[in-house]
Amino acid sequence: MKNRTKLPILYLGLVLALMYVPILVVILYSFNESKISSVWGGFSLQWYARLFRDRAMFEALRNTLVLGGASCAAAGVVGTLGAFGMTKARLRGQGAVEYLSALPMMVPEIILGMVFMAFFSLIGLPFGMGTLVLAHTAFCIPYVFMLVKARLVGMDPSLAEAAQDLGAPPVRVFFDVTLPLTAPAIASGMLLAFAMSIDDVIISVFVTGVDVNTLPIKIYTQLKTGVTPEVNALCTLMFLATLAVCLLAAFLARERKAKE
Amino acid sequence: MKAKARQKKGWAWLTVLPLYAFTLLFILGPLIYMVVLSFLTREEVWGVRLEFTLDNYAGIFEPVYLRTFGESLKLAFLSTGLVVAIGYPFGYFMAKLTAHWKKRVMLLLMIPFWTSSLLRLYGWIIIFRAGGVFDQLLMALRITSEPLKLLYTYPAVVVGMVYALLPFMILSVYSSAEKLDFSLVEAARDLGASPLKAFLTVSLKLTLPGLLSGLVLTFVPSMGLFFIADILGGNKVVLVGNLIQEQLMKARNWPFAAALSIALLLLTTVFLWLSRRLSKEPS
């Protein structure tokens, strides 16, 4: 008969708990009165106050969001269009292009950073937000492309055919039938791309300009040189945002399941 | 008929044009440039000379650089091994849960997964710092009497790597184990096989695809995740990634950095290819 030991559950619980320990530590110390992380000086919200007065931090946040938005939008357009074209018709060289476009996902980030930096230097592009967007779009495209392509390949062609049989021109078929059905895949691809972009450190460090800072870069340099608990406060807020998004996604998934 | 097909192709070319253009310009172009760069000579103060040389590749074989590659491989293997040891049971046990609990555990897993990697890394710094949480805990439990100073040591880096890569392995194994029909395992047990034998012959074989894709998802990044070694290891742990960054930024030896990158790329490609060969092996 089936073994009903507690071992599996204990194991799962232990590993999960360990996963949250570093996160909880960061959150806990964001309320620390003392500046030195290891000494608890009492409960305080001063670091949050400092955070809200920090102009440089807000600028970095703005850059990060703009960068993420621009990259996921660009990747969304290029990747979706590309996936559509490649599934509808057999075009010359599409296998090679598909492989190449997915390379950024399979290559260690340090190499990507190096390659982009060298290339942008070569063609004389000034380093800054522009180069950041280009580099981020490059590694965001595969996420959108693969998800949309998978959706298109698995989609029932008879729906589009039925619309055409009823007399709709190709453009209408696209907008009224194909696009709504592919929309979830496009959305998840773009969301994934956005998440990858706002967490990126290595590539950003290589292709950014002197005065353009993103949040990950800022946190990274602080972690290396010397941290103030202000970063803890920032991290706590970031974590709350992530938590909210995850819970929202889970809730939406449950809603969609209920409707089906 | 033919006109319609040609018109279809025309539209298709229009839609893929951005992708083609972008890929050729910003992915193929840089790659070709990197290969070319690795064969050029470095100019004294700045830039490169258009002089063909194999020195950059020869330079890789110097003991100090070979050792760096060795260190990266060692760390990658160690981290991957630990990730398998911890992650495989997790994915397997998770697949055995009821549907209700599966969703809960998945959510609990997703939250750290989506949390910024830097944030989680920072948590380990606080924990490992001399006199930090870990030290305080050990001293409170009277296991040690002095701070262990685990930050900037090799074990700290390993912990950081394993921690960062674990979710990928868990998700891979889980997606494979979830499709596993556990009644097969019970059948094997009913036929008299010991739990271990049943696991090895049934479960392991059927979850092998998940395990192998997890290996790829773990091993390849572990060769390049140098910023974990950078932050948790300080200057004591030098990996290929650190080396490339150093050559690019400080030594300004771009050709050498390019050669190192290509070497790293070849190494990871070999492992990728190997794992794909292994996964196609008939059982």
Image (tube, rainbow, N blue to C red):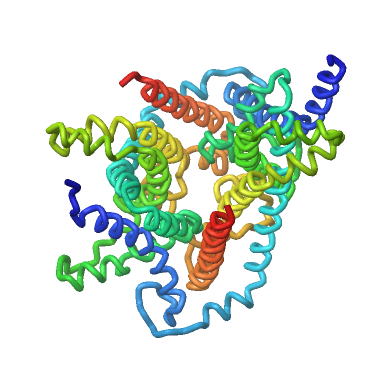
Q: Left or right: A235 with respect to A32?
A: right
Q: Nearer the viewer, residue B104 or B253?
A: B104
**Is residue A93 in sight in this rendering?**
yes
Kindly indicate the quadrant of the structure image that contains residue A160: top right
Front residue (pair B15, A70): B15
Could you tell me residue A53's position as x and y percent? 63, 77
**x, y (%) of residue B257?**
54, 33
Q: Nearer the viewer, residue A227 or B11?
A: B11
Q: Relative to A37, does residue B47 appear above or below in the rendering?
A: above
At x 32%, y 60%, the residue is: A18
Q: For the point 64% across and 41% down, which residue is it? A: A144
Is there any visible trace of residue B232 in the rendered image?
A: no
Q: Is residue B198 left or right of residue A210?
A: left
Determine whether A206 is above or below B114 in the image. above
Rendered location of residue A152, percent (x, y): 65, 35
- Residue at the image position 57 percent from the left and 81 percent from the top: A49
Number of disc labels: 0
Q: Is residue B145 left or right of residue B57?
A: left
Q: Residue furthest front?
A: A166
Name the image quarter holding residue A136. Answer: top right
Residue at 12%, 33% in the rendered image:
B192
Residue B218 coordinates in the image, percent (x, y)? 41, 39
The quadrant in which residue A123 appears is top right
From the viewer's side, name the closer residue of A24 and B174: B174
Q: Is residue B82 left or right of residue B44?
A: left
Outermost residue on the top side: it is B2
